[in-house]
């Protein structure tokens, strides 16, 4: 509505307060003029205070003025306006009267004491009651495992012994997160039975930077077995046998779904916004498998594409493994359909890279919500946009940006079109200008820009950090026993024709260049002089143009893809991902547990630069483990730096206060002291 005012009026001292309303101050500080769509309405006296308050309440309640703009214009706080409006709603005009010595006698409806705190308390109580009456979230226990299926979980950590030195003792700090956040052992007990120790082993491998089972050749098997609740880690042959036994159960998909649901119900991850991207998992075996694109090498390689979905805090919400290059849209549909029931029927806002670009793709996922870059935008033209267009401000990763929103219709060659929100963003320091597009109708412009820049503004994505800490490509049980369901392949005839067409076009371009460089010569009478060389080149050019048209026709008629059966060649094999999925489940649980532990540590060590190094120092330190009938105690070695040691102690106290119990009923406790067998002088 503010646009109804002319430029002259905007420059004449009007202060706009929303809904077409504006205020203009006078030479008398206690008098102000009110206008509506440029037309004078009234002259308002601001003293005594009751006049000012009643004027403000009228503007907000009856005329729809914006509280923040009104507060700025009148020089009062937004909290004061909220208090006046709430007081008026509760007690009428009498509640707005100034307090005096005996006002509580004359005006019993008048609040005494700190009105802001009283109103805040009332609003909080009202909100809490509404939430209690309208609670719709189902905190059901269907992610818990019935007692009859917890037998294997109760057998772990059953031994009793006095303090024993353990080089991996610090990693048992993660056991608290596994039990308190995931109920890890009980959840998997019903799925994997006797092989329960294998997924737990995978988690502890991630914690202790053991990136393959081959590294167990140099591990301390008794001590590593102790952190798994076993007397001793089995030898390498038995470990491999156990992994293949776990694979043959084919329960990885159920395990994925179980932990996905558990994380949402327990509030471990955020689900309103998801960052989705894929990366290559290379295959180096002898079998023929589909190829995927390696962004690091810019070429196709045998392997699979692994999609990870992270939330706003960097936690892993979901992962998916697909053959070959994979399908980003298919992964988007899967994660959106899984989250939608837990988000009041609304799909999450999915942030993706340019791989999603295309009108056909946008139309096929119109029921989803996405944010992505605008592909092939003309940055030079965007850089010419005047600064006054950019009205929004945002700062991310110590970089300042300005932005504004428009709408644009995108078209394809088949006359399809889609209209998207288009946000132009400019880096204030470098001047780089780019565009972001979205089909979302719920979030603000700032949220859309924040979503895109939060993911790719400073750090590429979660893979960069995840890959530096874990072995993302590892598959503990490679298996290619079945043919792939997708036997399509690039048609070699189509590839041959495209290559031939490219060669002809290159030759034609070269010939055209030669003809352009050779100047025409004339006779004395002004007629063109004949040139045998030129005529030959023109004849060759005409022949090339005919050949290009013929080959182009063949290319259009030749199918781009064929299949191995028609070509009579060896079929593509499918990589079985049962072992890989269990490795990824352990990776997800470890990564998210690491995030939770670092947040706990932040309470005692509020420097972000120290958090992960100190947490890794704590969890990679040696310790001493003691197991009694009722308690499993882990004593950690003291850190040397005093502030780090204090944070270590407080973190252990915090975990102890949660009274975390193992499936067998033992209380899990942590201590930070010297070697229990050292001699004290």
Image (cartoon, rainbow, N blue to C red):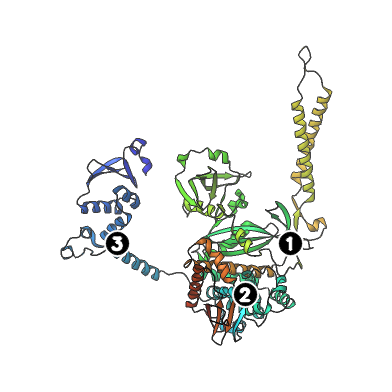
Q: In this view, does 252 lie above or below 399?
A: below
In the rendered image, residue 241, in percent from the top left (x then y), is placed at: 73, 77
Q: Which of marks 1 and 2 is in front?
A: 2
The residue beneath circle 1 is 283
C-alpha gap between disc 1 and disc 2: 32 Å
- Whichever of labels 3 and 2 marks the residue nearer the N terminus, that label is 3
* Local secondary structure at mark 1: loop
Q: Which of marks 3 and 2 is in front?
A: 2
Q: Which mark is residue 168?
A: 2
Left or right of 323 in this view: 408: left
Q: Is residue 394 above or below residue 151?
A: above
Left or right of 395 in this view: 166: right
* Local secondary structure at mark 2: loop
The residue beneath circle 3 is 116
Left or right of 285 in this view: 638: left
Left or right of 108 in this view: 38: right
| Nearest the eye: 232 or 278 | 232
Count neighbours of disc 2 (C-alpha within 10 A) and say few if under 14, some if 14 to 19, many if 20 or more. Answer: many
Looking at the image, the residue that sits furthest to the front is: 681
**Which residue corresponds to the image point at 63% horizontal and 80% vertical from the top-left?**
226
- Whichever of labels 1 and 3 marks the residue nearer the N terminus, that label is 3
In the rendered image, residue 665, in percent from the top left (x then y), is placed at: 54, 84
- Whichever of labels 1 and 2 marks the residue nearer the N terminus, that label is 2
Count neighbours of disc 1 (C-alpha within 10 A) and say few if under 14, some if 14 to 19, many if 20 or more. Answer: many
């Amino acid at each position: 509505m503010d646009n109804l005012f002319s430029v002259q009026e905007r420059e004449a001292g009007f202060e706009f307060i929303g809904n077409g309303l504006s205020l203009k101050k006078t030479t008398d500080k206690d008098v102000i003029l009110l206008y509506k769509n440029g037309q004078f309405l009234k002259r308002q006296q601001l003293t005594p205070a009751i006049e000012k308050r009643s004027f403000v309440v009228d503007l907000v309640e009856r005329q729809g003025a914006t509280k923040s703009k009104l507060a700025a214009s009148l020089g009062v706080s937004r909290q004061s306006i909220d208090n006046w409006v709430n007081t008026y709603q509760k007690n009428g005009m009498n509640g707005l009267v100034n307090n005096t010595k005996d006002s509580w006698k004359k005006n019993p409806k008048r609040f005494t004491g700190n009105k802001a705190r009283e109103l805040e308390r009332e609003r909080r109580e009202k909100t809490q009651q509404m939430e209690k009456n309208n609670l719709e979230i189902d905190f059901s226990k269907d992610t818990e495992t019935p007692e009859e299926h917890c037998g294997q979980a109760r057998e772990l950590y059953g031994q009793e012994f006095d303090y024993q030195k353990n080089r991996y003792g610090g990693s048992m700090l993660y056991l608290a997160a596994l039990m308190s956040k995931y109920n890890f052992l009980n959840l998997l007990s019903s799925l994997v039975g006797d092989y329960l120790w294998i997924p737990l082993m995978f988690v502890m491998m991630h914690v202790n930077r053991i990136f393959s089972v081959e590294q167990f050749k140099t591990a301390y098997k008794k001590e590593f077995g102790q952190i798994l609740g076993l007397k001793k880690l089995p030898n390498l042959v038995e470990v491999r046998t156990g992994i293949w036994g776990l694979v043959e159960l084919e329960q990885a998909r159920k395990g994925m779904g179980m932990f996905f649901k558990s994380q949402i119900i327990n509030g471990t991850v955020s689900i309103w916004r998801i960052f989705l991207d894929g990366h290559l998992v290379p295959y180096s075996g002898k079998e023929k498998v589909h190829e995927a694109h390696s962004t690091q090498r810019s070429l196709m390689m045998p392997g699979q594409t692994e999609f990870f979905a992270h939330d706003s805090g960097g936690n892993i919400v979901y992962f998916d493994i697909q053959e070959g290059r994979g399908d980003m849209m298919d992964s988007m549909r899967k994660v959106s359909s899984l989250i939608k029931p837990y988000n009041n029927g609304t799909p999450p806002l999915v942030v993706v890279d340019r791989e999603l670009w295309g009108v056909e793709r946008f139309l096929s996922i119109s029921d989803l919500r996405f944010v992505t870059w605008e592909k092939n935008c003309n940055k030079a033209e965007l850089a010419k946009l005047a600064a006054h267009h950019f009205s929004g401000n945002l700062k991310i990763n110590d970089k300042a940006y300005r932005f504004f929103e428009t709408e644009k219709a995108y078209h394809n060659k088949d006359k399809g079109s889609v209209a998207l929100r288009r946000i132009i963003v400019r880096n204030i320091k470098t001047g780089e200008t780019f565009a972001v597009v979205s089909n979302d109708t719920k979030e603000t412009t700032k949220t859309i820009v924040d979503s895109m820049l939060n993911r790719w503004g400073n750090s590429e994505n979660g893979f960069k950090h995840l890959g530096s800490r874990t072995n993302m490509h590892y598959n503990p049980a490679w298996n290619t026993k079945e043919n792939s369901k997708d036997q399509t392949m690039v048609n070699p005839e189509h590839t041959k024709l495209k290559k031939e067409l490219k060669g002809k076009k290159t030759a034609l371009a070269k010939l055209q260049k030669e003809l352009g460089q050779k100047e025409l010569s004339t006779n004395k009478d002004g007629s063109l002089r004949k040139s045998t060389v030129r005529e030959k080149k023109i004849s060759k050019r005409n022949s090339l143009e005919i050949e290009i048209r013929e080959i182009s026709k063949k290319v259009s008629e030749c199918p781009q893809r064929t299949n191995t059966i028609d070509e009579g060649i060896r079929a593509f094999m499918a990589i079985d991902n049962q072992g890989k999925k269990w490795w990824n489940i352990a990776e997800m649980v470890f990564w998210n547990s690491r995030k939770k532990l670092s947040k706990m540590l932040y309470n005692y060590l509020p420097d972000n630069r120290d958090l992960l190094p100190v947490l890794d120092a704590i969890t990679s330190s040696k310790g001493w483990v003691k197991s009694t009938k009722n308690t499993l105690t882990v004593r950690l070695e003291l850190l040397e730096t005093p502030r780090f040691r204090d944070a270590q102690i407080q973190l252990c106290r915090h975990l102890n206060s949660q009274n975390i119990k193992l499936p067998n009923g033992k209380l899990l406790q942590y201590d930070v002291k010297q070697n229990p067998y050292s001699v004290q002088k």
